[in-house]
Amino acid sequence: MRPVIFMLLALIARTTVFAAVSIEIDLAKQKAFLLEDGEVIDESPIASGRYGHLTPRGDFEVLEKDLNHKSSLYGKIVTRGGRVLVSNADVYMSVPSGARFVEAPMKYFLRFHGASGMHAGYLPGYPASHGCVRLPLEKAIEFYNAAEIGTPVRVHGVTPTYRPPPRRILAKPTPGAKPRKPWNIFKFLGF
């Protein structure tokens, strides 16, 4: 009886067709696509790695899934009371006395190469990460639930160049100086 059951299970396993899920990340478009049998079933805006920390390109596969992953390299430095001293810190920065390094949360993490992976995070509208691919929370959940260890991940395209506009520094008035009056065309013309 047992051999018959094993043969039946083997036959069912060979005839059952599972949809092939894959992930495609287009750095130029700053989008991620979830594919089933080569057809796009979902897409998401992303924030990939910025210059100096580019997201690696190539053909990879999901190596790890971690629902509540935390970065071992990046985070923030906060006081005991929770006040943020450095918002974009890394583990190599010195931490002042009475403060601590807090690892950055990377929920719904799908590692695909080295330290790089996909996870829920902030999307400012341009490449801004240290190499990971950030997705909005709801999309990160969808990609996480659809992918398994071994799911193919293809990263292609050229990261768009983005330079944030320079911050305007407003000059402080010199102590004791009178504020300048704005130029008035009517006064200039004698009205």
Image: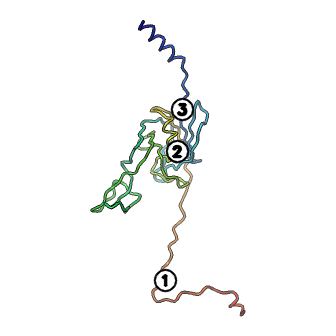
Q: How many marks?
A: 3
Q: Position of residue 138 (x, y in %)?
A: 52, 44
The x and y percentages for residue 155 are: 53, 41
Q: Which amino acid, mark 2? A: Glu
Element carrying mark 1: loop
**Cα separation between marks 1 and 3:** 61 Å
The numbered dot on residue 138 is: 2
Q: In this figure, which colouring scheme has been used for the structure?
A: rainbow
Q: Residues within 10 Å of mark 3 (few under 14, many from 20)?
A: many
User: Which residue is painted at 40% across and 44% down in the image?
Assistant: 69
Q: What residue occupies the far bottom of the structure in this picture?
A: 190
Residue 133, relative to residue 63: is it above or below? below
Element on which disc 3 rests: strand
- At 59% from the left and 47% from the top, the residue drawn is 29
Quadrant showing the C terminus: bottom right
Q: Does residue 120 appear to the left or right of 187 in the view shown? A: left
